[in-house]
Image (cartoon, rainbow, N blue to C red):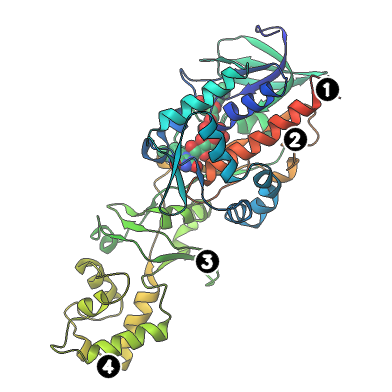
Amino acid sequence: MGAEGDLQDVLILGAGAAGLWCAEVAARGGRDVAVLEKVTRTGTKVLASGGTRCNITTTLGPEEAARLFGPKGERFLRAGFRNLPPAEVRERFEAWGVPTEVAPLEKIFPSSGNAKDVRDALEGAARGAGARIHLEAGARSIERDGDHWTVRTTDDRVWHARSLVLAVGGKSYPKTGTTGDGYPWLEGLGLEVVLPVPALVPLTSQETWVHELTGIAWQGGEARLESPDGRVLQRRRRPLMFTHRGLSGPAAMDLSHHVARASSSAAGLRLKVDFFPDLDREGLRAALVASAGLPGAPRLQRALGGLETGPMPRRLFDAVAANASLAGDVTVNGLDRSMRHALVEAMKGLPVPVHGTVGWDHAEVTAGGLALREVNPRTMAVNQCPGLFVVGELLDLNGPIGGLSFQAAFATAQLAGEALAKAGPVPLA
Ligand SMILES: Cc1cc2nc3c(=O)[nH]c(=O)nc-3n(C[C@H](O)[C@H](O)[C@H](O)COP(=O)(O)OP(=O)(O)OC[C@H]3O[C@@H](n4cnc5c(N)ncnc54)[C@H](O)[C@@H]3O)c2cc1C
């Protein structure tokens, strides 16, 4: 078995994180596996990931990790993350000769700091288990043909397969080969696709004062996104960075799918930054009052430097003070009650107007994709489409930065691979 035109046993479209993982599991489980990859090499996104260091998974436990995908995602991923917990992803890579290490913010990287080691291990494991990988074999269309699936490739070849796994990824970072090819195929089968939007992507702001803070990073804050009626859509305590276009850093990027989905009405969303999330308003007020007694009537900025987060950069402090209608050179002793109240409010929730995202070219992942209700969460088999499986970023899943996207890709691929191995080479129902 194996040549184009023959009936393949298992055909996987896409040799990325999920496709290679699934190929290894299915082939090791006794299936005859061929993988078709559109571009000239495997795992292009793996190679680009984590600043080319590749944050492969998280130190979190399976339940906690699944929870980061929101209620719908959590329900869907619970079985997959239990079946392949983050710790086991780590063990698998260690067994493939890629030692790993823990980094801040619950991240796991290869100890070499080299994403190529991760890609090579995935490809080596798939090939080692017997999977055949065909490069520059982009799929153009898929269709159900009686008891099998037919796939046409861009070079006009035709492939037939008993089981078909779609692992073509999403639409983000299209230069790596992921251009959203899977969505029209799924819609063509009558399946629901949740509108794909860029996610884990920096935010834009049209405010000059935001641009003027370019280069300033704040490590210990919490960003929260509020709907126009004041409802908190999501909060994220992670580093934040001001850029010449708006906001970046994990805190902003983790919230970006909401902004992208709101598209033209994104201006209605309000992003607020709590610079001192460890202190409630009363605590912050008390810290200010206490520092008022210090000799030399210190400037507020210096007083705030006594707090755990360390001194606020001058330009950032001035922006916060301006939001509270205070002059940047105000002293602690010069604050009356209402001024102190305004300052505390600005420090606990500085509104930063955001207007959109910097778009697909810079988005790490895609939010949206095949609706989860179309898929069996224990096998990744598409309900109503015998022999069809969907794994990885093509699914309507999105989690925050921190190795969670790979964790989801590997866990969904593991389930599909196991289901294929268990079913054996049976004709379609
Ligand atoms: C810059 C960047 C940094 C990132 N860093 C991290 C990180 O550190 N940690 C983390 O968890 N996640 C990270 N991600 C996200 C992560 O890379 C993806 O979520 C993950 O690769 C998704 O796996 P996948 O297999 O579903 O899709 P992909 O890995 O994107 O693989 C899809 C594959 O399908 C191929 N393909 C597309 N269309 C076709 C077609 N028609 N026919 C055949 N093949 C096709 C593509 O060329 C690609 O090889 C990052 C993403 C980017 C862009």
Please, is residue 27 above or below residue 201 in the view?
A: above
Are dots 3 and 4 in contact, CB under 8 Å?
Answer: no
Q: Which residue is mark 3?
A: 227
Q: CA distance from mark 3 to mark 4?
A: 32 Å
Q: Residue at x 47, y 24 (%)?
A: 120
Are dots 4 and 1 in contact, CB under 8 Å?
Answer: no
Q: Does label 2 point to a residue whose CB lies under 8 Å from ligand 1?
A: no
Question: Which amino acid lies under the numbered mark 2 shown in the image of this protein?
Answer: Val
Q: Which residue is mark 1?
A: 428
Q: Which residue is mark 4?
A: 336
* 177 vs 45, nearest the viewer: 45
Residue 278, picture quadrant = bottom left
In the image, taking residue 51 as reference, residue 124 lies left or right, namely right
Q: Quadrant of the C terminus?
A: top right
Residue 67 spot, x, y in % from top left: 61, 56
Residue 259 spot, x, y in % from top left: 48, 55
Q: Earlier in the sequence, mark 4 or mark 1?
A: 4
Q: CA distance from mark 2 to mark 1?
A: 13 Å
Q: Is residue 360 visible?
A: no
Q: Residue at x 78, y 30 (%)?
A: 385
Q: CA distance from mark 4 to mark 1?
A: 76 Å
Indicate which label's residue lies in the foreground, 3 or 4: 4
Tag 4 secondary structure: loop
Question: Which amino acid lies under the numbered mark 4 shown in the image of this protein?
Answer: Asp
Q: Residue at x 23, y 60 (%)?
A: 212
Tag 3 secondary structure: loop
Q: Which residue is mark 2?
A: 382
In the image, taking residue 425 as reference, residue 86 lies left or right, namely left
Q: Earlier in the sequence, mark 4 or mark 2?
A: 4
